[in-house]
Image: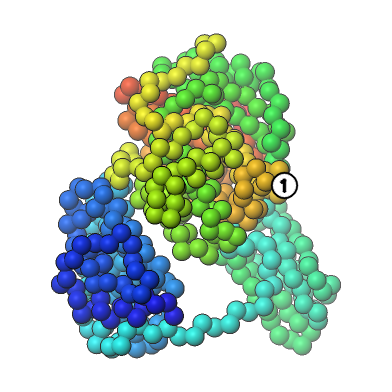
């Protein structure tokens, strides 16, 4: 039981307190002023980005404390009420960051429901939330994939002696069976007809005594076997280079383009070293640093929610929280760590000057746009970051050494980027032009004058990295996407 749960009963009886909000939760208790801060919806409605960030940070920390506690039956109602208060506060803050009143109001309603449930719930748990003894974990049978990973159809099992039959199920459907397997590590490949996408993989083992062993990996992302091909060598494709130059010449504005076909090493680019305002694209450095910091199993980390929010909809709140956590509370320490991670991933020109402002998710010489921001990147940098991540996920020792990511950490990162939320600006510049069933691990960024996309696209010949940066005063999403269409079709031809 964590020390923090001892103080939960104090929370239930002291909601009227209005003390100053601390920077982080103490280890010995969750103080009443934390709940007071979370119950004050004025933080999100005030329009003060710093107040919204504090609200998010406090609520996420409380969520982590609650998630680490398994209450006894008499305390479950209190646990649920506090969870509703914490999660409602998180969602309300996210609604502010996304400029989405529907999401914000949904969070405020959840918070209100938690407050209503809190008063009667505290009477059944008068001595604070007590934790039950956790159940002992079962013997590990499914070695790979692990929960939350992207994988390429290869499944590894630890088969115990006396196993009569092994069966693999994907999304609830039986796909593969092996009778009388030998004991030890068994590698099986899912058939090519399994399809791609997010789902659950289950292994069923029947012993000769008639017992059934079951192991499950949830939220895994199945990619085609050919997606595992990934070489970091680069061989310039002259014809594609000329084609990209012709495409860029027809765009009224600044553009940077980089293409790397990872199955063959074929590369082509246009103005790929030019420096653009990075917007949210360099959050890839935060993601990679977080995967490493909370490895070797980032999927079990309390910060997984923040990594998902950063990857799915480019949350400024999550990026800022991760940045400070990486620096042990010091933004400058976290900033330097993220920039070093970007260098290790091959992003030599990119910068990460500090936190994002909450609520703003909105020739022979290089053709560079005006320096409107100190947060910069290049098309080549983003391409190198994704190429290294994909290669590490595919098993490249070179990529794992240079990036500092293990294969599991890289596969979690790729899976998170595959889950990029396809709505609004976050659809990006490529997704509208790709077949619906073609997976793409993507990161986008945008400000009023710049729109960027970088992606690993899992096409018919294997993974292809494509990055496109665009800049123009008054640039519309439609114009940037039309350029994206020409670029991605040329890259996959």
- Tell which of 392 and 13 is nearer to you: 13
- Tell which of 232 and 323 is nearer to you: 323
Judge the density around disc 1: few (<14), some (14-19), many (≥20) Cα neighbours within 10 Å. some
Q: Position of residue 72 (x, y in %)?
A: 40, 86
Q: Position of residue 75 (x, y in %)?
A: 34, 85
Up-down: is 245 above or below 174? above
Of the 4 image quadrants, the one containing the N terminus is bottom left
Up-down: is 184 above or below 161? above
Residue 126 in view, yes or no: yes
Left or right, 358 with reference to 414: left
Q: Residue at x 34, y 81 (%)?
A: 6
Q: Residue at x 56, y 53 (%)?
A: 292
Of the 4 image quadrants, the one containing the C terminus is top right
Up-down: is 314 above or below 20? above
Q: What's the image's color scheme?
A: rainbow
Q: Residue at x 61, y 16 (%)?
A: 242
Say which element carries label 1: helix
> Quadrant location of residue 54?
bottom left
Q: Residue at x 62, y 63 (%)?
A: 146
Up-down: is 289 above or below 375? below
The residue that disc 1 covers is 397
Residue 433 in view, yes or no: no
Q: Position of residue 302 (x, y in %)?
A: 46, 64
Which residue occupies the extreme top position in the image? Answer: 364
Q: Position of residue 451 (x, y in %)?
A: 41, 31
């Amino acid at each position: 039981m964590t020390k923090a749960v001892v103080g939960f009963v104090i929370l239930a009886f002291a909601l009227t307190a209005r003390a100053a909000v601390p920077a982080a939760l103490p280890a010995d208790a969750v103080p009443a002023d934390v709940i007071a801060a979370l119950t004050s919806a004025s933080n999100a409605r005030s329009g003060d980005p710093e107040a919204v960030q504090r609200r998010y940070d406090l609520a996420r920390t409380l969520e982590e404390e609650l998630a680490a506690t398994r209450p006894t039956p008499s305390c479950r109602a209190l646990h649920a009420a506090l969870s509703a208060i914490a999660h409602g506060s998180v969602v309300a803050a996210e609604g502010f960051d996304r400029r989405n009143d529907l999401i914000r109001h949904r969070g405020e309603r959840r918070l209100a429901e938690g407050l209503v449930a809190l008063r009667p719930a505290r009477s059944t748990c008068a001595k604070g939330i007590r934790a039950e003894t956790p159940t002992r974990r079962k013997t590990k049978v499914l070695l790979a994939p692990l929960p939350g990973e992207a994988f390429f159809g290869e499944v590894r099992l630890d088969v115990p002696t006396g196993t009569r039959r092994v069966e693999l199920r994907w999304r609830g459907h039986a796909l593969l069976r092996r009778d009388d397997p030998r004991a030890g590590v068994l590698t099986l490949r899912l058939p090519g007809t399994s399809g791609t996408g997010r789902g659950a993989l289950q292994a069923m083992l029947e012993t000769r005594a008639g017992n059934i062993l079951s192991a499950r990996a949830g939220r895994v992302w199945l990619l085609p076997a050919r997606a595992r091909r990934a070489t970091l060598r680069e061989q310039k494709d002259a014809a594609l280079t000329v084609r990209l130059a012709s495409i860029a010449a027809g765009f009224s504005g600044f553009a940077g383009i980089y293409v790397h076909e990872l199955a063959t090493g074929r590369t082509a680019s246009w103005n790929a070293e030019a420096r653009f305002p990075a917007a949210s694209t360099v959050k890839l450095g935060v993601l990679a640093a977080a995967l490493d910091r909370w490895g070797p199993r980032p999927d079990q980390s309390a910060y997984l929610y923040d990594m998902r929010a950063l990857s799915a909809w480019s949350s400024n709140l999550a990026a800022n929280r991760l940045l400070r956590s990486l620096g042990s509370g010091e933004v400058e320490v976290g900033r330097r760590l993220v920039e070093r991670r970007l260098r290790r991933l091959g992003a030599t020109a990119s910068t990460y000057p500090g936190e994002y402002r909450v609520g703003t998710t909105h020739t022979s010489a290089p053709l560079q746009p005006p320096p409107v921001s100190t947060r910069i990147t290049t098309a080549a940098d983003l391409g190198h970051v994704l190429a290294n991540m994909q290669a590490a996920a595919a098993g490249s020792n070179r990529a794992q050494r240079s990036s500092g990511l293990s294969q599991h950490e890289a596969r979690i990162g790729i899976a998170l980027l595959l889950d990029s939320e396809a709505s609004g600006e976050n659809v990006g510049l490529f997704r509208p032009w790709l077949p619906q069933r073609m997976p793409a691990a993507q990161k986008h960024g945008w400000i009023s004058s710049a729109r960027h996309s970088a992606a690993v696209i899992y096409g018919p010949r294997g993974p292809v990295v494509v990055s496109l940066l665009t800049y123009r005063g008054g640039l519309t999403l439609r114009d940037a996407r039309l350029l994206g269409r020409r670029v991605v079709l040329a890259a996959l031809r």
